[in-house]
Amino acid sequence: MLRAQKLLLSLLAIAASASPAIAQDPIAAYPKNYSLALDNEVVSVVRVHYGPHERIGVHDHSKFPTVYVYLSPSGPVRFEHDEKPPFRLTRPPVSTGAFRVSPGRVERHAVENLGDVSSDFLRVELKQVPLGSALQPFRGKAPTSPSQSSQAVEYRSPQFDVQRVICQPETQCKMDSSTSPSLLIAFSSLKVNENDNVALLKNGDIKWVQGSHPAAITSASNAPAHLLRITFHSKQR
């Protein structure tokens, strides 16, 4: 009987080692670090927080192409990819307002914040952009001194554009008109006026704009209003 039990345990161990790793949803497994901020037919926006020197265990992310939007200055963060062969990547320090476009890939990794301050950012997962759609990787730098009002497209593709909008205090800036929906991501305290409906946003807040009405922004502090606008084009474009 004892011998049979040992044989059964050995067989179970072999089966477990041969089976593929079970997918680990980061929102369910690590709710302190990952939370869903928005989910619709176009995007999923996941809010991410890594505390100083915090380590997060192995988990999976979607394969969707992703725009990473950095909400705080932070030091390096190490990603230990659980693949064959395993490898490590270290994200360099980032600044508030920077962003990165990733064409998408299998993501299964553990994370360690190597810095002395928290790292806060958004994962904007592009659900209507197919994997392998030849998106160009891109890193958009944060402005060093946003001293003038401006609207500049910093990344352009057939599927979406990323535009930086800066509006000086005591000035109303009407954003470029578009019939396409867009996601607004604030880096400062500001007001968004859409069809006479005013929304107050602060750093890290987001707003989905359908695009049927022109929107204008104003600063809600003594600092310039500063945001990213990701505009999603129709599939026919």
Image (cartoon, grey):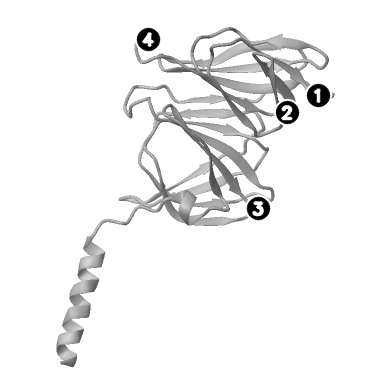
Residue denoted by label 1: 223
Mark toward the start of the polypeptide (1 vs 4): 1
Distance Cα–Cα, label 3 vs label 2: 23 Å
Query: Which quadrant holds residue 215?
Result: top right
Distance Cα–Cα, label 1 vs label 4: 37 Å
Look at the numbered disc 4 and give the secondary structure of its residue: loop
Q: Are marks 1 and 2 in contact (CB under 8 Å)?
A: yes
In the rendered image, the vertical position of residue 72 relative to residue 166, given as above or below: below
Q: Residue at x 55, y 57 (%)?
A: 55
Mark toward the start of the polypeptide (2 vs 4): 2
In-front residue for pair 54/167: 167
Q: Residue at x 20, y 67 (%)?
A: 15
The dot on residue 140 is none
Q: Residue furthest top?
A: 177
Residue denoted by label 3: 52
Mark toward the start of the polypeptide (3 vs 4): 3
In-front residue for pair 201/13: 201
Q: Can residue 151 be seen in this snapshot?
A: yes
The dot on residue 237 is 4
Look at the numbered disc 3 and give the secondary structure of its residue: loop
In-front residue for pair 152/41: 41
Distance Cα–Cα, label 1 vs label 2: 8 Å
